[in-house]
Image: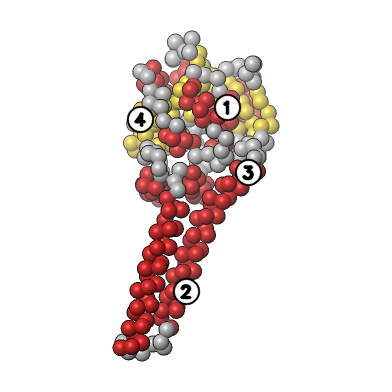
Amino acid sequence: MKTISVIIPMYNEEAVAKECYKRITSVLLELTNYDYEIVIVDDGSKDKTLEVIEEIAENDKKLRVISFSRNFGHQAAVTAGLKETTGDAVVIIDADMQDPPELIKDMVDLWEDGNEVVYAVRAKRKGESIFKVLSAKMFYKVLYSLSDVEIPKDTGDFRLVDRKVVDVINSLPEHNKYLRGLFSWVGFKQKPIKYVRKERLAGKTKYPLKKMMKLAYDGIISFSNKPLKLIGSIGLLSIVLSFILLVYSVCSYIFNWNNLVPGWASIMVSISFFAGVQLVSIWIMSEYMSRIYDESRNRPEYIIKKKINEKEE
């Protein structure tokens, strides 16, 4: 009998933890031809999330719990879940129930048809601010245009992934993972499935603007070297522009086109322009260098404090 694993990262989800478990378990029990396991990764919650899921795990051995020593972030929590699961297919879903667990049945059907990655595409977003919707659209548009890999628009981490794909992802040694990009990068047969994203069941979003910005530049820096190429283009443009300014300054001096002090305009424009180019270039290069530094330190992406109902080898 094949096994379906479900990964649920949680951070301060005390208000929704029980309902999330009930709905997902109910869906999995309807898949009568499959065994299942649920892996909840507590990402260093500061509320009673861990207590709630520990209580549930005492009565359900199919529920496994991984607790981090502190908050390491959503992508680290999903990564930990991928490494701990044993199922033939793995579903990643958030605890807030904006992504409907009932869609898992359709994902499993598409997987049985031979699709190795089934990713959910948000046809519509409910309960989200205009700013968040517009910023998300802008992010995916920029990422799509910059990335060397075709990353589907309007997708999150909600997806079903075949075991062979999970094994490949687990073999990648890099830190600062942008998983939805990596799932596209590894290839395999992929199939989208559209759905309407609903409002949060309860609580507040765990992705404020600061975390959204980090996720955005993680995706861009991890999957594109075009910003580096852009520096070269700006450099060539700077040389051309400086030559035009030089010609203009000489002509201005010879023909007395204006009353400015000779050389003032060209010097000020050149200094401000090249200072801006240098600062932008340094910022972009520093982002890439910081990633190299993170990799060279070889620190773990996360630290596990506790495991409950650990799978026996």
What residue appears at the point 44 percent right and 70 percent down from the top-left corner?
Answer: 273
Disc 1 residue type (three-letter): Lys
Viewer-proximal residue, 62 or 220?
220
Residue carrying label 3: 296
Q: Earlier in the sequence, mark 3 or mark 1?
A: 1
State the residue position of label 1.
83
Image position of 85 (left or right of 70)? left
Left or right: 177 with respect to 247? right
Residue 271: which numbered mark, if any?
2
Q: Which residue is mark 4?
A: 192
Compared to 193, does 32 lie above or below?
Answer: above
Q: Position of residue 137 (x, y in %)?
A: 37, 46
Label 1, secondary structure: give it. Answer: helix
Q: Give the percent coordinates (x, y) of residue 100.
A: 42, 29
Whole-percent x, y for residue 59 in the image: 61, 17
Which of the 4 quarters of the picture holds residue 112? top left
Q: Please determine whether, in this image, residue 309 is positioned above or below residue 47.
A: above
Secondary structure of the residue carrying tag 4 is strand
